Structures are given as structure tokens and as C-alpha cells.
Image (cartoon, rainbow, N blue to C red):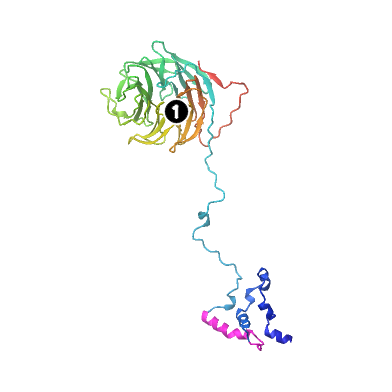
Amino acid sequence: MSSSRNTRNPLGEQNFLMRKPNWENLDRFIPNRAALDLDYAHYMVRGGRKGIENPEAASTPYQKLLTETFNMNRGRIFTFKNKPPTPVEAIPRRLLSPPLHKAKSTKPSRRVPQGPEKTMDAPGVVDNFYSNLLDWSSSNILAIALENSVYLWNPSNHSIIKLVTIDDEDGPVTSISWALDGQHIAVGLDNSWVQLWDSVSVRLIRTLRGGHHGRVGSLAWNKRILTTGGMDGRIINNDVRVRSHIVGTYKGHEAEICGLKWSPSGQHLASGGNDNVLFIWDRSTASSNSPRQWLQRLEDHTAAVKALAWCPFQENLLASGGGELDRCIKIWNTQTGSCLSSVDTGSQVCGLLWNNYERELLSCHGFSKNELILWKYPSMVRMAELTGHTSRVLFMTQSPDGCTVATAAADETVRTWNVFGIPGVSKPARKENPLPFAHLYTIR
């Protein structure tokens, strides 16, 4: 009986082949595919002959024919003894998906302080939008005009000296500007004169007369040439080395000159006036005999144009700001005269400064918010708003290293702001002084 049963089904009982398989435990019944003869199993399922003692012999002719036909070893079709080779990727996976951890930027983030570093009492700051009464020299001396006097503050040792006091009939002081050497300073007066002073010896060098009729509210140096702008709307180039100092004039404004700025190359001059007009002049167009034609006449502002700043990293790029009825900062291509962007700040624009290390622009404002705003260029997105002054911030200047900004406001204070930090240079935290108001200084 057992012999018949084994001959009929050498792989096991027949009812096992008809039984419904348990797929969860299938690996227990097929431990190695190489050991199976699928042809014989198929033959037996369809009712193979019962009298064959050697079932493998039935499939031998077929196997031989299959091997000869396809020139292969049929017994190794389903055998995987070696690990299959790794497929070659057409596009590396690292290029298709971003890395799990982004590499840290090598450029550290810069913190913009929201408050001033120092606050100095400056009684007598003239509340006049059309004057320019604050300037920082290349030798790191901050000059400020308070009514009829000019004071010099040294940030290194906090010393303060009085440079000059003007007589009442000639004053008050309406503008000041340091020469590039950091030693000589020009002082514009209400009586139309301009004085040149040596800050080291504290002495008057010469007085420039006869150029203007009315106060001189704007000054700008271009090497040995001092450009002056007056209430009479005239712009004059003065060579301070010669006796006949007037060597060129620019005429185009119909009202008081509010702002003057030479480009970094010294080739172009920007002038803004109370006639709401911005002019771009070429250095070579000024002549002592007759005024020359401007390069650009820009009339997009709707109020006085005082704030002017040439871009330090892109030639022919100029920022300008309008007064209380305009409130806009405009970026110009001075070569073509096109306005690249314009943003409404919401307040009177009194001053503009570019960051020498980043693509940023700083503005100071009067009515109505009396604040400083740091802008990202070219998107002109507000990065920070610096508050502290309680009245309009009329004057703003930059330290020679480009990091610190000084502002003077109608609240009779001068404040310094560490708004332009050098990237990659970490500075130690400033120790708090235990004495109240110990950080306050007084000018004069």
C-alpha cells in the first residue's frame, strides 16, 4: 500500500497538492526553488502515469531539447547564488533630492541694534530742514554746528573742543563739510560766506566771499574743489588753492539748494533743490565764464530734494529722498535718467546713506515718525526700524570705517548707531555701566 502511495505521489500526499496553501507560511514549504522540478509537478497535477518508478526520466528528453535549443542550463534559471550587480543610476540620487541637512552659510548673520550706542546732549541744534550741520571726517572726528558755534568730538577719547564761534551778524552756521584730508573743514554761514578752518591748529585759513547771495546751506568736496550751494539757487565750484577761487558754476535750479553730493569717482555731481528738482552734472561742464548744461534733469519728486547718496558698489546709481509732501526714496540710473524704483516711506526723508559692506540703504526721517529705516537693496524691503529720537532726524553722517552712523535731531541730541557692522567680524558685548545716564555726553 505504501509503495503504491509513494509511486503515485513521490513529493507527498496528493491531498497536499490540492490543499489551499497558507501564504503566510509559504517559505516553510518552498525553502529552495533550485530543488524543484516544475515540469514534473505540472505533469503529476494533470494526472501522470502511475507506473513510472523514476519520474525524473519523463522530463529528461524535454530538458535536453530545451537546453540544446536555447543553449542554456535550465536548472539554474531560478537560482541566485551570487548577489545581482548594482544597477547604474542614470542621474545620481543626490541630484534628484535635496540633502537632509543643508550646509550652514559661511556668512554669519548680522544683528542690527534697535537702539543707539551713545546719546549726547546737543543744545542749540537748529531745526532747519535746508541746512547740513553734521559731518564725520576721515580722521574720525565728528563735527556739529550748534547755532553760531562748531564743535569737534573725538570718539576715541570722548574729548570735545570748540572750533569757532561766529558773530551774530554773520551767523548762524548753516552748513559744514570736512575735506578729504580729514584736517580742514568748510563752514557755510547765513551771510553767504564760507570759511575754511584748520582743525589741528584751530585757526581760520581763508574766507570765500562774493559767490552767493544768501545763506550757504550745502557743501561738497571734490579733492581741492569745494562746491557750494546757496539760497540763491546757484552752485559754484571753488578752488581753495588760488586767489580767484570761483572756477565754475552750475545753474538750473530755481530755488534754494538743499543737497550736494559728488560721485565716488568725482566725475558727476548730484544737486537737489527746494524746487523739487534733481540735477546730474558733469565735472567738465562747469566754467567760470558761463554755466553749462546739465546731464539729467529729474522732476519726479514732489517736495524739496535734500537727501542724496551715490551707490558705492555700482557706478551711475543714485538714491534721493523727498521732503514732507513727497516722502519717497527713489533709485536712479543717472546715465539714462530712468527711475529704477520708488518707495513711499510715510515720512519726510532727511538723509540717506549706503552700507559699504552690504547691499543696504539707510534713511533718516522727520515728520511724522522721526526714525531711521534700514532697507534691503534692490527689493527695498524694510529690514529694521531704529527709534530713539523724539523729533525729526535732520542730519546723518557715517564714520570713516563705514560701521557707525551719527544722527542729529531737533530734539537737541546726537546719537550714534552701530547699524553697519562689518560681516564676519564679531565684536565683544558692551559692558553695562552701573551708573544711570553714564552713557550720556554733552556737547558744549
Please identify the quarter of the rendering in which residue 245 is found. Answer: top left
Picture coordinates of residue 427, whole percent (x, y): 56, 32
Residue sitting nearer the eye, 183 or 96:
96
Q: Is residue 76 left or right of residue 305?
A: right
Tell whether position 100 is magenta: no
Q: Is residue 321 left or right of residue 91?
A: left
Identify residue for label 1: 347
Residue sitting nearer the eye, 344 or 382:
344
Residue sitting nearer the eye, 73 or 182:
73
Picture coordinates of residue 139, whole percent (x, y): 46, 24
Q: Residue furthest left?
A: 289
Picture coordinates of residue 149, whole percent (x, y): 45, 15
Residue sitting nearer the eye, 364 or 265:
364
Q: Is residue 437 left or right of residue 348?
A: right
Quadrant showing the N terminus? bottom right
Tell whether position 56 is magenta: yes
Q: Is residue 235 visible?
A: no
Picture coordinates of residue 198, whole percent (x, y): 42, 18
Q: Magenta segment range?
A: 49-70
Circle 1: is it few (<14), some (14-19), or many (20+) Cα within 10 Å? many
Q: Main secondary structure of the magenta part?
A: helix
428 relative to 186, above or below:
below
- Looking at the rendered structure, the kind of residue marked 1 is Ser
Q: Is residue 12 left or right of residue 141?
A: right
Local SS, label 1 = loop
